[in-house]
Image (cartoon, grey):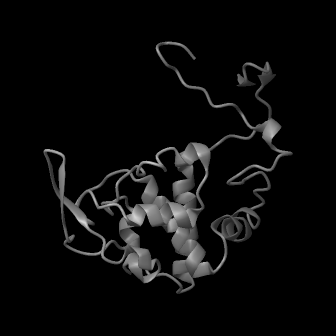
Amino acid sequence: GMANISQNRPMGPDTLFRIASMTKPITALGIMILVDEGKIKVDDPVEKYLPEFKGQMQVASKQDGMLTLKKPARLITVRDLLTHTSGLPGGFPPGASDLYGRRHLSLAEAVLLSSQQPLDFDPGSKWAYCNAGIDTLGRIIEVAAAEPFESFMARRIFQPLGMKDTFFYPPADRLPRVAAVYDVKDGQL
C-alpha cells in the first residue's frame, strides 16, 4: 500500500504510524511501573495526586437548558481511570474541543480543564470510553515521577525496549517517514 497517496510514497519497512488509542495500554504500563515502585496505588483517589479534582461534581439532570449538579457517590480512583469507569466526560469543553488536533495545551492544562467538568455518572458505576481519563493518568505519571510524561515513557519504556522510533511527537527528521492518515467521507477517501 501507500504511506502517502498524494506524494506517491509507498509503505516501507521504516514507515512510522500514529498509534492513537494504542497509547492507552502504554500509559497504563507507565502507571503500573509506578505502582510497582510504591509511588501510586490504583485504589487511591485521583485528587491525592491531582488536587484540582477535589470537589468534583456530577451531572444530576439536564432539563430545559438547566444543568443540575450533585456530589458523586464516591471519588474517582486511579483504577477508574485505567478501566474507563471514572465518569469523566469523553470530550473537552469549548475552547479545547479540538485539543488533539491543535495540541495547544500542555497535559497539565488539559487535565485541569477535565477536572472542572462535571462527571457524567458515578465513578465505578458504568463504562464509557474516555480519552480525558487516559490524559489524567499521564498527568499522574508526571506528578508521581516528577518528570514530563513523554520523557518518563521514553526513559522507562521505549529506550529500554529499543523502541527508537516511538514518540509522542515525532521529531522533524522522522516526519517524512510518518504514514498519512486517511478517512472515508461520502464514499470518498
Residue 50's place in the image compared with 121, above or below, is: below
Q: Quadrant of residue 174?
A: top right
Q: Quadrant of residue 73?
A: bottom left
Tally of numbered tags: 0
- Report whether 173 appears left or right of 99: right
Examine the rendering and report whether any part of residue 42 can be seen. no
| Horizontal and vertical percent position of residue 86 | 33, 63
- Report whether 134 appears left or right of 15: left
The one of 38 and 112 positioned closer to us in this rendering: 112
The N terminus lies in quadrant: top right
Residue most extreme to the top:
187
Residue 182's place in the image compared with 171, above or below, is: above
| Horizontal and vertical percent position of residue 103 | 61, 50
* Residue drawn at point x = 60 percent, y = 26 percent: 182
Examine the rendering and report whether any part of residue 62 can be seen. yes
| Horizontal and vertical percent position of residue 84 | 37, 58
* Residue drawn at point x = 74 percent, y = 19 percent: 6
* Residue drawn at point x = 79 percent, y = 21 percent: 7
The C terminus lies in quadrant: top right
The one of 111 and 159 positioned closer to us in this rendering: 111
- Report whether 173 appears left or right of 40: right
Residue 172's place in the image compared with 105, above or below, is: above
* Residue drawn at point x = 29 percent, y = 61 percent: 118
| Horizontal and vertical percent position of residue 18 | 65, 42
Residue most extreme to the bottom:
38
Q: Quadrant of residue 87?
A: bottom left
